[in-house]
Image: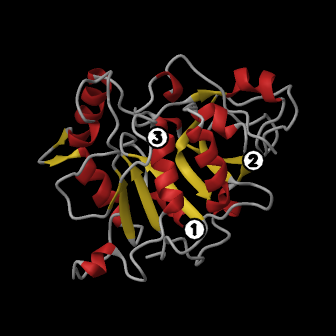
Amino acid sequence: MTGRTIYLLCGGASRRIGRDKAMLPVGEKMLLEHQIGKCGNVFDEVVLLSGQKKYPVTHRHLFDRYNDAGPLSGLLAALEDKGTEGQTSRQAAGETTAGRSGKTTAGRSGETIDKAAGKSSGKMDAKTSGKRAGETAGTVTGKTIAAAAGRTGGPESGIRVVMAVDLPGVSLDTLHRLASAHLPDGFDAMIAVPYGTEKPGSESISRSKSYQPRAFQPLLGIYHRRVTDRLHDYLSTGRRSVAGFLEQIRVDVFYVPESELQNINTESDYNRFSNRLR
């Protein structure tokens, strides 16, 4: 195990699919249990960012300070988490195995989170925001993202690993990379972007306006606690746009297969995922 905690964003309104995504059946389990089990193979603790909901699992829940504020309120809860006074929730329960687990240019797509506060995840078109911000994040290669293996990332550290519950395609390889990742100097967060968005012939995304990657997934990545006050101030003024907040901090990116960033938003998405498991 890595000594690091992962925070699962769940408890959203799920308006498009019409039911709580975390409770969707996955074989004999619910999607939440499926994700907890997978994350538990990598992380020492899985904490639920559950909005105002309580799920039928024993894992630690963190509730939103702001009602109907979407995933940013869950992120704030993760940033403010101080753990369980030196012991994980699994240790407190007496269980024997660990588990559970520059400026950015993320903009908006036709189905972004900011159009539907409370949904579990969304992708953001960076081309649009590149015109607004004029800068984009650099990348972290597989070598860089694993460079800090052995560093701690539990609630006592400054790093918070977050993942939306409705990203069932995220692989164990990606989770291991996140479990050992660190933030490059000068960056506040690092979020996923699909392969194929690199600038041809370069390992890094250009910082100029001439090239922008297609999409970001801000609900799969790591954030540093130093942005806590900025996020609190942002939400306290009634703002809810994930893209808008990311424009206020410096965000790096890391690459994953595009299939891992396909979230469940509709019944068709859910059916495709279910069929792959058969």
Residue located 65% across and 72% down the image: 148
Residue located 54% across and 58% down the image: 79
Which mark identifies residue 278?
A: none
In primary-sequence order, the first of circles 3 and 2 is: 3
Mark pair 1, 3: CA separation: 24 Å
Which one is nearer the viewer's eye here, 138 or 256?
A: 138
- Relative placement, left or right, of 185 versus 144 is right
Which residue sits furthest top? 110
Q: Secondary structure at mark 2?
A: loop
Residue 39 at x, y percent in the picture: 37, 60
Residue 90 at x, y percent in the picture: 28, 75
Report whether residue 231 is seen. yes
Q: Which residue is mark 2?
A: 250
Which one is nearer the viewer's eye here, 128 or 138?
A: 128
Which residue type does callout 1 highlight?
A: Ser
Mark pair 3, 2: CA separation: 19 Å
Which residue sits furthest left? 28
Which mark identifies residue 71?
A: 3
Q: Are marks 1 and 3 in contact (CB under 8 Å)?
A: no
In primary-sequence order, the first of circles 2 and 1 is: 1
Of labels 1 and 3, the one closer to you = 3
Which one is nearer the viewer's eye here, 58 or 125?
A: 58
Q: Which residue is mark 1?
A: 180
Residue located 41% across and 67% down the image: 42
Which residue sits furthest front? 237
Question: From the viewer's perspective, is residue 65 above or below residue 111?
Answer: below
Report whether residue 174 is seen. no
Question: From the viewer's perspective, is residue 148 above or below residue 250?
Answer: below
Residue 138 at x, y percent in the picture: 77, 46
Mark pair 2, 1: CA separation: 20 Å
Q: Are marks 3 and 2 in contact (CB under 8 Å)?
A: no
